[in-house]
């Protein structure tokens, strides 16, 4: 059992739901790197507590203010294993005023190799949110599902933090 299970809970149920949702949209993510998981919290106290605990499981890559609140990104010493995948990074956003989220895993992000028009064109039944295609660093497209989302971008979180920011 990964030590993250004791801190954030087992991500298996979240990931099972996520991959089932992608399958319903006919998106085969088997060749995409599952870059990181995002875990949301409801309070600043909980953010501080989990940030401290996650620091014991890996390296704090970054804590930057994005969208009016800090977001901490960690590279784990030991990856989370899920169905042959190794997930090395976890993102922990502080709560954002006016945007309450229940605590738990909230999204996952994949790295894709093809350009966005080709990727979107390969999945005509998926209703991609393309607002973030205009981001200066690491643009992305997103699919929203009941209670979680999935994002697709061209660079990993760790690469962006280490080399592009």
Image (spheres, helix red, strand yellow):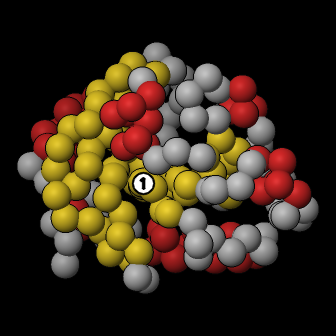
Residue occupying the far bottom of the picture: 83
Left/right of residue 156 with respect to residue 139 in the rendered view? left
Residue 162 makes an appearance in the image? yes
State the image coordinates of residue 106 (x, y, percent, origin top left). Answer: 49, 52
Residue located 68% across and 75% down the image: 28
User: Residue 64 occupies which quadrant of the picture?
Assistant: top left
Q: Mark 1 points at which residue?
A: 36
Left/right of residue 163 with respect to residue 98 in the rendered view? left
State the image coordinates of residue 163 (x, y, percent, origin top left). Answer: 39, 31
User: Residue 121 occupies which quadrant of the picture?
Assistant: bottom right
Left/right of residue 92 with respect to residue 128 in the rendered view? left
Residue nearer the viewer, 65 or 29: 29
Badge 1: how crowded within 10 Å, few (<14), some, or many (20+)?
Answer: many
State the image coordinates of residue 5 (x, y, percent, origin top left). Answer: 23, 67
Residue located 20% across and 33% down the image: 48
Residue located 26% across and 49% down the image: 75
| Image quadrant occupied by the N terminus | bottom left
Q: In the rendered view, would you say 14 is above or below 119?
A: below
């Amino acid at each position: 059992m990964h030590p993250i299970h004791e801190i954030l809970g087992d991500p298996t149920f979240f990931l099972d739901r996520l991959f089932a949702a992608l399958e319903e949209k006919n998106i085969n993510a088997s060749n995409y790197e599952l870059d990181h998981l995002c875990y949301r919290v409801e309070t600043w106290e909980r953010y501080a507590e989990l940030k401290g605990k996650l620091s014991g499981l890996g390296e704090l890559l970054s804590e930057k203010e994005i969208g009016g609140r800090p977001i901490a990104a960690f590279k784990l010493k030991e990856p989370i294993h899920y169905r042959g995948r190794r997930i090395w990074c976890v993102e922990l956003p502080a709560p954002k005023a006016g945007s309450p989220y229940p605590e738990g895993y909230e999204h996952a992000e994949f790295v894709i190799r093809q350009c966005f028009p080709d990727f979107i064109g390969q999945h005509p039944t998926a209703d991609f949110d393309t607002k973030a295609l205009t981001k200066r660093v690491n643009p992305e497209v997103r699919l929203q599902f009941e209670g979680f989302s999935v994002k697709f971008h061209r660079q990993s979180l760790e690469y962006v933090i280490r080399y592009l920011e």
